[in-house]
Amino acid sequence: MVDPSYKGKQYPPYEFTIERGKLREFLLAIDEQNPAYQSEDAPVPPTFPTVFTFWGGANLEARLGEMGVDMVNVLHGEQEYEYFAPIRVGDTVTGQTRINDIYERKGSSGSMQFIEFITEYSNQSGALVLIDRALIIVRG
Amino acid sequence: MAVYFEDLQEGSELPAMVKGPISQVQLVRYAGASGDFNPIHTVPDIAKMVGLPGTIAHGMLIMAVAGQFLTDWAGVAALRRFKVRFSGMTQPTEYLVCEGTVTRLEEADTEGLVHGRLTIKGKQDGSLKIKGEFTVAVPRRI
């Protein structure tokens, strides 16, 4: 049972600098061969921001652990990105995450809890580049 | 080949894309690349222990496939909004079929906004993996 008082919690900001090698590793993993991603100031593919979360220091496992939730019992329910400006190799983004909502739904297989994380990313010039909304489902 | 606003209408279909097979090695690769080391994606014994049939693909890997489907069509700088709901699990050996439809066109000054929805289904059993919505900006001919 997730403590609903975590709703509204703000996490400390974290930074991530986009390196070409990291982009290449990600492209290989998703089997993406579009030559547009090969230049020195290449844009990143649409779901690359997931790398900001996990490698930028937003430790999801720790965030969930703090709420008493084991990572192996969660599923990713929904993911949304809103893109406001290009994000390219060489950029440094700063992410600021908050818990926008925590709620419960009863389904056929018992009740499930939902945690909605919203992260706003700005770039090195201070411009808002991306809003990331992730809905996490806690099973059982 | 570029997509132009004038070439699209409500109901236009995106060129379908088939991707796969997803492999266990790819899940290990994706874990490292993304930084999502949840063992349900990489360690079969742990996946089974929590009631899964075996390792399952990261939802974000399947969303990445959907992203490629969109950028192959509209270009790598076109996306303005991209939302998916993860509906079903994907297991290694599965092939994925991406399909999409334009639902609404919105005129802007030098570009047009194209709204649409997409699905990814398993090729073998037709099971729904993700269902999504998107908005892309495409150039106008004028």
Image (cartoon, coloured by chain):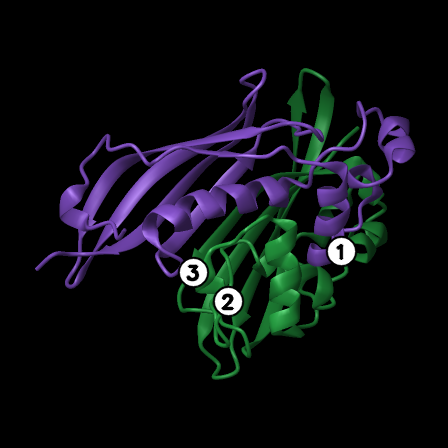
Please tell me the numbered disc located at residue A83: 3
Image location of residue A137, percent across then percent down: 69, 37
Whether residue B100 is situated above or below residue A48 in the rendered picture? above
Question: Label 1, label 3: how many angstroms apart (C-alpha)?
Answer: 25 Å
Q: Which residue is mark 1?
A: B32
Q: Nearer the viewer, mark 2 or mark 3?
A: 2
Residue drawn at x 48%, y 47% is: B67
User: Is residue B139 shown left or right of residue B124?
Assistant: left
Residue A71 x %, y %: 81, 44
Q: Could you say where residue A126 lies in the image, as x and y percent from the top left? A: 48, 81
- The residue most toward the bottom is A125
Q: Kindly identify which chain the residue marked by label 2 belongs to.
A: A
**Residue at horizontal 24%, vertical 33%?**
B12
Question: Rounded to the nearest whole Å, what is the CA distance between mark 1 and mark 2?
Answer: 20 Å
Q: Residue at x 53, y 18 (%)?
A: B126
Q: Residues within 10 Å of mark 2 (few under 14, many from 20)?
A: some
What chain letter is assigned to the residue under label 3? A
Residue shown at the point (61%, 63%) measured from the top left: A24
Q: Amino acid at mark 2?
A: Gln
Which chain is indicated by disc 1? B
Q: Is residue A81 left or right of residue A55?
A: left
Q: How crowded is the residue under tag 3: few (<14 C-alpha within 10 Å), some, or many (20+)?
A: many
Chain letter for purple? Answer: B
Chain A: colour as depicted: green
- Residue flagged by tag 3: what amino acid is it? Tyr
Q: Amino acid at mark 1?
A: Gly
Q: As displayed, is residue A13 above or below residue B70?
A: below
Which residue is tagged 2? A38
